[in-house]
């Protein structure tokens, strides 16, 4: 995760550009198991002042996930911009979700956790395949057929029946 630590000591005041990439291995450091694949490019512009760093992240890429409806693989495109302000001080503190205070003596700032949060915020709440031009779902047709079958029943787990009887006794 060292490539997500931006070295600012030794840089002159002004604009500095970085290009970062995220792949599946990035998300393995976090416990986000829904992501099966990842190809994200982050163009980072950092403006360095004497006591502050201002980051602008331009995030663009795709994530592989599993469809919430049919369970088949799904590719989600994300795009967005995020800002982060890092104040240089003699102590650590997180003022808000987009303002961080770090020790100037560290000489570098770790932005990995912020990148993780930015990508997670860009994910849609409902992750399903879209529809084709005729309005028909692109989800697995066998699964959709089974979900829409009014005659489909399943046998309940017998352990639930035991618990239901215990509840009825009360």
Image (cartoon, helix red, strand yellow):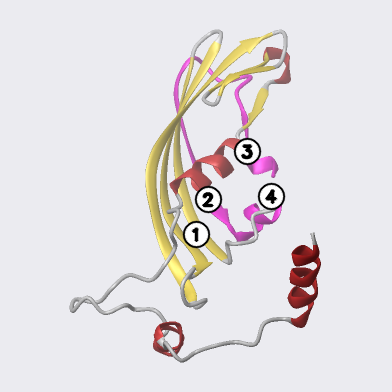
Nearest to N terminus: mark 3 or mark 4: 4
Nearest to N terminus: mark 4 or mark 2: 2
Element assignment for label 2: strand
Element assignment for label 1: strand
> In this picture, which residue range is highlighted in magenta?
1-29
Nearest to N terminus: mark 4 or mark 1: 4
Location of residue 4 in the rendering, given as x and y in whole percent from the top left corner: 62, 40
Nearest to N terminus: mark 2 or mark 3: 2
Q: Nearer the viewer, residue 131 or 163?
A: 163
Label placed on residue 113: 3
Location of residue 105 in the rendering, given as x and y in whole percent from the top left corner: 72, 14
How crowded pointer 4 is (Cα within 10 Å; few <14, some 14-19, many 20+) is rated as few
Q: Which residue is mark 2?
A: 21
Nearest to N terminus: mark 3 or mark 1: 1
Name the side, left or right, on which 144 lies relative to 11. left
Residue 106 falls inside the magenta stretch: no
3D distance between C-alphas at marks 4 and 1:
16 Å
3D distance between C-alphas at marks 3 and 4:
9 Å
Label placed on residue 25: none
Location of residue 159 in the rendering, given as x and y in whole percent from the top left corner: 79, 77
Q: Which residue is mark 1?
A: 39
């Amino acid at each position: 995760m060292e490539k997500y630590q931006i070295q600012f000591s030794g840089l002159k005041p002004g604009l500095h550009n970085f290009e970062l990439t995220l792949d599946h291995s990035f998300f393995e450091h976090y416990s986000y198991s829904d992501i099966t694949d990842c190809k994200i490019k982050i163009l980072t512009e950092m403006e360095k002042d004497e006591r502050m760093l201002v980051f602008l992240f331009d995030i663009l890429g795709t994530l592989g996930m599993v469809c919430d409806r049919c369970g088949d693989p799904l590719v989600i495109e994300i795009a967005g911009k995020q800002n982060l302000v890092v104040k240089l001080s003699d102590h650590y503190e997180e003022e808000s979700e987009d303002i961080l205070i770090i020790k100037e003596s560290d000489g570098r700032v770790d932005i990995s956790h912020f990148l993780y949060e930015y990508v997670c915020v860009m994910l849609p709440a409902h992750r399903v395949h879209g529809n084709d031009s005729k309005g028909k779902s692109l989800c697995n047709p066998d699964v959709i057929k089974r979900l829409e079958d009014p005659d489909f029943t399943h046998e309940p787990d017998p352990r639930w029946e035991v618990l239901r009887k215990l509840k009825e006794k009360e």
